[in-house]
Amino acid sequence: MRTLATQMRLRRLIRVHTDYVERLAAAPADGELARSARARLLGLSQDVRGAWRADLTGAGGAPGAAVLDRHVERTLRLLESVLAELARPAADRRWLQERFQDSALPLLMFLRGLEEAPAELLAA
């Protein structure tokens, strides 16, 4: 199953998230930066979702696609809930960063695995 477009957008989200976390660590009281980070990162997460939809459509309705879709959507919702918390003044940004990384990196590895998985395995 082709997931390269989703992987590219997810890598971009991870990279931009890391940049914002570093900037927010340097200026923790900057509410405007936190709100901008949240808006930009949530927009990038929507790009990931759109790419996943396109990749899933390109798979042509494989029998196991619904299970894969549920997993990816559940993980994206988790990422978005973490990103939405960035702008809260009392947010523990280190904890949020860990939650983001704990979800985003395994999702990236999962998508890479789908790219390399034989079609027969996905049809099972």
Image (cartoon, rainbow, N blue to C red):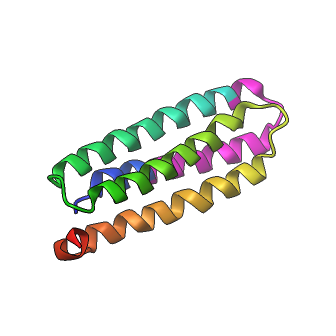
Query: Which of the 4 quarters of the picture holds residue 80?
Result: top right
- The answer to whether residue 68 is above or below residue 113 is above
Q: Nearer the viewer, residue 120 or 29?
A: 120
Magenta region: which residues? 11-34
Residue 90 in the image: state x and y as whole percent: 85, 36
Q: Nearer the viewer, residue 24 or 44?
A: 44
Q: Give left or right: position of 93 versus 61.
A: right
Main secondary structure found in the magenta portion: helix
Q: In the orientation shown, which residue stands out farthest toward the left?
A: 60
Name the residue: 57% across, 47% down. 79
Residue 50 in the image: state x and y as whole percent: 33, 39
Q: Give left or right: position of 98 versus 68.
A: right
Query: Which of the 4 quarters of the picture holds residue 38?
Result: top right
From the image, which quarter does the C terminus lie in? bottom left
Name the residue: 26% across, 74% down. 117
- The answer to whether residue 41 is above or below residue 96 is above
The question of residue 16 being in magenta is answered with yes
Counting the numbered discs, the total is 0
Name the residue: 22% across, 63% down. 1
Residue 65 in the image: state x and y as whole percent: 27, 57
Name the residue: 72% across, 31% down. 87
The question of residue 99 being in magenta is answered with no
Residue 96 in the image: state x and y as whole percent: 71, 49
